[in-house]
Amino acid sequence: MFGYVRYDLPNLYVKDFMLYKAMYCGLCKGIGKACGSIARMGLTYDVAFLSALLHNIAGIDVKIEQSHCVQHSIRKRPIACVDQLTEELGALNTVLLYYKLTDDVEDGGKGRGKRLFFKRGFKRAKKKYPELVQIVDGFMKEQSRTEKDQTASCDRAADPTANMMKALSNHFLKEKKSEATGELFYGLGKWVYLIDALDDFEKDGKKGNYNPFVLSYGRMTKKELMEKEGEEIRFLFDTLFYSIRDNLAKVPFSFNRDLTDNIILLGLPAETARVMKGEKYTKQKHDQKL
């Protein structure tokens, strides 16, 4: 579920790369404030993107200051100040990761030991943000039921995660929410679920884990899948991208939107193409500098 939301570096302005790094570090501090320092090990690019998107739509100005952090203790670097939204998103980062690790454990995979690192942070998030955890918990249970029912439809399989993102956007945006923002986050949630399922197609097929693409098309290699069913799968994602672009155009932004446009309009399609080709993501030097 994590690790697919990335920017498109060749088309990213330097100013936006610097903003993203500052917000990434700010989210790290937000996690520490909400859930404790150990929970910062679960920092994700995906929630850093949500922070940039939600701050802009909500009209909450991001203040950046030169500061130290745990990883960069010697030299100061630009870091976004932690506000209420950042802190709650830090809690969301921990909650989503905890549920993901729980899902891994229930699937019979590894993750039990790793989950212990985030148990205390999850409890802190649950105590401080009960409504947030209630939203995630409800849709995660619905997602589990959908998968246990062996739902073959990719659209229906992704619906609980998509609706969770929609509900979370309404929770964070409050009076700034609209039909367009709800549908935008619904589309983003649907994409995250489907790209994860497509990426795990071969692995889930071999292990017998639930995967809507395996149930729809059968067990085979990713190369065979795209050769036989590629046109239909590309149509599924193209239709989704059309909806995302359409709703994105209807959302009023308070500040410069170059960063989030780069991620949504360029980064997500590029990541989709990578997964369809069966290529592994290679961490670049610029990722290591975040």
Image (cartoon, grey):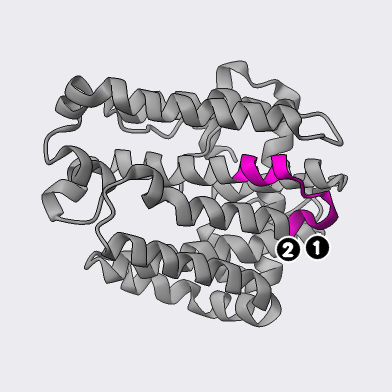
Q: Point out which mark residue 87 bears.
A: 2
Q: In this view, does 266 lie above or below 97?
A: above
Q: Which amino acid does label 1 sit on?
A: Gln
Quadrant in which the C terminus appears: top right
Is residue 101 inside the magenta stretch? Answer: no
Tell me where the magenta segment starts and ends, as one range. Answer: 172-185
**Tag 2, which secondary structure?**
helix
Instruction: Give the camera-side residue of 172 and 88.
Output: 172
Q: Is residue 258 above or below residue 43?
A: above
Q: In this view, does 106 lie above or below 217?
A: below
Q: Is residue 48 above or below residue 9?
A: below
Tell me where residue 250 sits by quadrant: top right
**Tag 1, which secondary structure?**
helix
The 10 Å Cα crowd at callout 2, few under 14, some 14 to 19, many 20 or more, is many
CA distance for labels 1 and 2: 5 Å
Is residue 177 inside the magenta stretch? Answer: yes
Instruction: Give the camera-side residue of 198 and 281.
Output: 198
Asked whether residue 129 is in view, the answer is yes
Identity of the residue drawn at 27% across and 65% down: 148
Q: Which amino acid does label 2 sit on?
A: Glu
Identity of the residue drawn at 82% across and 47% down: 58
Q: Point out which mark residue 84 bears.
A: 1
